[in-house]
Image (cartoon, rainbow, N blue to C red):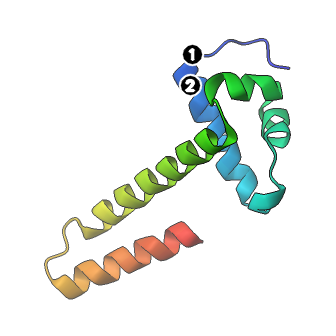
Amino acid sequence: MSDRRKSSGDRKAEIVEATLRLLTVTPVEALSTARIADDIGITQAAIFRHFRTKDALWAAVLEAVEARAVSAWDAAEEGQTTPLARLRAVLRAQLGLIA
């Protein structure tokens, strides 16, 4: 297990990032907190020190996905001068997020 102590915020972000990364290769119903902990070299109990429940972890993951999506959409719209250009840019950004 990792000996390096991280701030609570950094550790939470690491757990969320690991969860998102693992979701690219693991079905959501098969992804356990034990697998997430193993991926980043911490104990399963450490996850629950940062997220009281698995639902709290999933809420943080969804918040991260939402933040990335909004950021991508906002960046895509920037500089587009027509409604059609904005729509195309946002759709390209959305397809990029999905990929």
Residue sitting at x 62%, y 40%? 57
* Residue 72 image position (x, y, % from top left): 38, 61
Q: Amino acid at mark 2?
A: Asp
- Residue 1 sits in which quadrant? top right
Residue under numbered circle 2: 10
Q: Is residue 80 left or right of residue 58?
A: left
Asked if disc 2 and disc 1 are in contact, CB closer than 8 Å, the reply is yes
List the single residue furthest toward the left: 81
Helix, strand or loop at mark 1? loop
Q: Looking at the picture, does residue 4 appear above or below residue 53? A: above
Q: 10 Å neighbourhood of mark 2: few (<14), some, or many (≥20)?
A: few
Q: Which mark is residue 43?
A: none
Helix, strand or loop at mark 2? helix
Distance CA(mark 2)–CA(mark 1): 5 Å
* Residue 13 image position (x, y, % from top left): 57, 34
Q: Is residue 42 visible?
A: no
Q: Amino acid at mark 1?
A: Ser
Q: Is residue 36 left or right of residue 19?
A: right
Residue sitting at x 65%, y 51%? 20
Task: Return the residue nearer the eye: 23 or 99.
Answer: 23
Residue under numbered circle 1: 7
Q: Is residue 35 visible?
A: yes
Residue sitting at x 79%, y 12%? 3
Q: 10 Å neighbourhood of mark 1: few (<14), some, or many (≥20)?
A: few
Q: Is residue 33 left or right of residue 96?
A: right
Q: Quadrant of the C terminus?
A: bottom right
List the single residue furthest toward the bottom: 84
* Residue 59 image position (x, y, % from top left): 55, 46
